[in-house]
Amino acid sequence: MNEFPRWKYVLVVVALILGVLYALPNIYPKEPAVQVSPGRGVVIDTALKEKTQGLLETQKIAFKSIEIEGERLLIRLSSGEQQTLAADALRDGLGDKYTVALNLASTVPHWLNVIYAKSMPLGLDLQGGVHFLMEVDQKAVLEAKEIQYVEEIRAIAKDKKIPGINASRSAQGGLSVITRSADNRDQLAAEIRRLLPELLVSNAAATGEAFALGVRISETKLREIATETIRQNVATLRSRISALGEPVITQQGTSRIVVELPGVQDTAQAKILLGATASLEWHAVDQSIDPNVAVSSGNIPPDSRIVLWRDTNAPVLIKKKIIVQGDDLVSAAAIPDQQSGTPAVSMKLNPKGGQRMLDFTIQSVGKPMAVLYTEHIPELKIVDGKEVRSSRVKEEVISVANIQGVFGPQFQTTGLGSMKEASQLAMLLSAGSLAAPMQIVEERVIGPSLGADNIGKGVWAVILAVILVVLFVGLYYKLFGLIADVGLLLNLVLLVAILSIFGATLTLPGIAGIVLTLGMAIDANVLICERIREELRNGSTPMAAISRGYDRAWATILDANVTHLIAAFGLMAFGSGAIKGFAITLAIGIVTSMFTSVMVTHVLVGLVFGNRRVKSLSV
Amino acid sequence: MELFKSSTNFDFMAWRVPSLIISAILCVASLGIVFIHGLDYGLDFEGGALVEVKYKESAEIADIRASLEGAGFKNAVVQALGTTTEYAIRIKPHDGEGAAPAPAADAGKAAQSKEGEAAAKESEAAASESVAKAATDKIAKEVLAALQKNRADVSIKRSEFVGASVGEELRSQGLVAVLFVILGIMVYLWIRFEWRFAVAAVASEIHDTLITVGIFALTGREFDLPALAAVLSVVGYSINDKVVVFDRVREIFRASRKDVPYDVLNRSINSTMSRTIMTGLTTGLAVGTLYFVGGPALENFGLIMLIGIAVGTLSSVFFANPILLYLGVSKQDLMAMTKEDPELARRP
């Protein structure tokens, strides 16, 4: 009665092998390294290798190896301190022509890389990462807001039948509204004060027929706009990069955002991961004149402008008016087109953007529409010996597509060359969905937020906790305890393997979560062993006791774990960042523990006892 | 070896009146502590000051931590900034300073007239900004003083206020998550057991979480992200514990001919007691090690779990089951459910 079909044995063995294989990379620690990549006009060669070696030897910095790996020189070192020392020495010694960056070199053997087994990256608390300081372009937001107010004032005038007003943004900031008479001016001023109380309205100079109003956005509203913008950008960044391990995103001061990404020490790579700090706009394409002709003749319609294609640099003539902006985009994903099966990108706008898109497409079926991608690239110049920060604006058209029909918030763009192109466009689109453009003003590598001694204590506590639990269970339930211990250790291996496959970031609280999961996973074995003891007390034969013990404990284990799993799923669905990571660990742990504590131990018990007739059980 | 004699038969239910009264008092007291005394939220939740310092010669990160601790900044986060001469220090204001913007807010409320209100709002916002800046500058000065005691070649590169790393969206999402979890557990227990079990489980869930957080608040420790994770784990542990006892209640009700709820509940508690203690001990052993050996990074997690395991175990016996009794659990209610899917009760 304690024998199983062969597939159960096979399943346990396969799980064991896969678990060990995919958990294995974690025992190979990453090595601190310094990476030297070539700038313009220089190459990485053996001469450079020898020069680097000489520099390090004169500075008495011990290193493990210097190797040329592709386009870069990788120097492996034994400690993080040596790493920073070496990087400082090489930055001074090699000069500006080479980029010297800190990196972490993998020591995982090649055969594990082949099966895509990789180690879990360590979190900010254990290893540090990259730190980006990003500045939000509040000016751009203010401009957009002022344009919106101009529209609203025009609408008010139209609504109240105040004729012949001229509203625009004035060059010195603020809005200027010109009416035809003093009465009109006063009436409009009163309406604006009533309907838009956040605006400060004052009378400006009146000349002849023109009675002007000066309109400013109040300080409170300005501050509110700024706060709201930065809050939105932080929220967007959080949702966009929470997939990247466990980043920390905080607001700093009034217009800056700090993004810290764990593990990645190579800032160039991190920037790609962070996505472009860009914004998006949808424009109608102006077809009244050929763009090449417009460029060569200089004859560009006043409400249009020329922008260039991303790859080919071919000109595109677009209307200045913005249909929808990046912050209206809810999501973008690459999918195969449902009718033709060709690659497509499906996009979803918020209700506001959807309404505007609907209004636009009703009038423009069959006409092309362009997506404009605006990126701010920070530049550092030395003027009179001082560092001057500025930014260059790069505008590119990333997609032009014909409007096939009237649509609202949900639409897709087809006609892309490949699925890869589609996913790239989707990535660019979702990267651009910020409320305001941002630029990276500072980037640096940061060390771990926990001290080395605290990390040491934490790791020691975790190991000790596992040992104590294993010993306690083994002593208390004897043979069945030892079998439970085997299940427990297999559970640890499986949990680590699955987390590694998912690429979860390992933080100290995360490790604590793993320990807790193990401590609680023993509960299933406790339930089984207690049941077996009960059955024995009630006079069952040993083999019947085992069988009924597992049988009756299973209902309890199932109920207890399903309710626990509901709790984990709740946290997973609604939590973000660290809490989400914790919940994922918990959920995976619950599932693996059901497998190891019940099935694996039962199979082991079956192997140990077989169909022997035993007189007593060691439980 | 047995920790709990299988033949024992304590009359736990006889304690139901005093135990429920004690539970009620503890709940009210915890509510009081959490809302009046409040939790000491850490940097993760409240933000603080970021001070970047620069040394002329390279400095040891351990020395910087020691200097700051010597000056009373206990939970300062120190990180190297790419080199051995520049460091970022994140620090929470000392108690009292964090609450500095409050008077400005009161001034805003005092202004009654409509126009006055707008003006007061502006000045309030401006005031809280300048107060935050002043607090940051003050911390920066204190940090500099603390560091200069040991090394004179240190200077401040920049000091700024940093926001919370746990956004407001997490706070609101957290509430939704908790409601979702409660609802999900209720529905599941309702289907698998009966509505009385669902109500008793969720009531004890809230009871356990509240008392755990209350006791933690009393310790005056800082509530950080690991602490939040621990509170959420307590929820998981506690529900696990309740379900095991409930499962036995259901089983005994269905198996026995006489159905005096009082006796059935007592027998259920007694026959699962051995398991309750054993699981409490193994889990407690794991998290206790984290608390006693794990150092500052894991202390909070371990402590909250220890409190939670104790509270959760006691409440399975003294809170959840008395509630079940008062809700009027009976054999008939459970028998009606026996035609459920037999697949679920099968072994794997």
Image (spheres, rainbow, N blue to C red):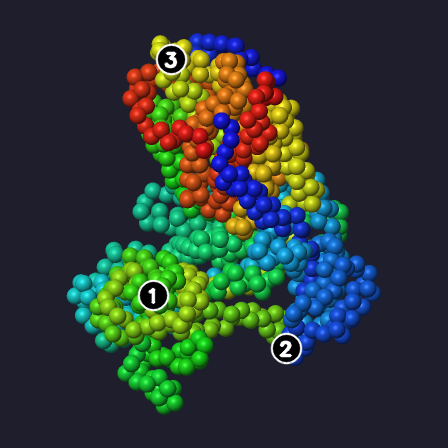
Among the 4 quarters of the image, the one containing residue A160: bottom left
Residue A204 position in % (x across, y down)? 31, 68
The chain containing the residue under callout 3 comes to B
Labels 1, 2: one chain = yes
> On the picture, is A612 further left or further right than A403?
right
> Which SS class for mark 1?
loop
Among the 4 quarters of the image, the one containing residue A143: bottom left
Alpha carbons under labels 3 and 1: distance apart: 63 Å
Q: Is residue B42 visible?
A: no
Tag shown at residue A40: 2
Q: Which amino acid type is marked by label 2?
A: Arg
What residue is pinned by disc 3? B256
The chain containing the residue under callout 2 comes to A
Tag shown at residue A592: none
What residue is pinned by disc 1? A341
How dense is the environment of label 2, judged by Cα within 10 Å: few (below 14), some, or many (20 and up)? few
Residue A26 position in % (x across, y down)? 63, 48
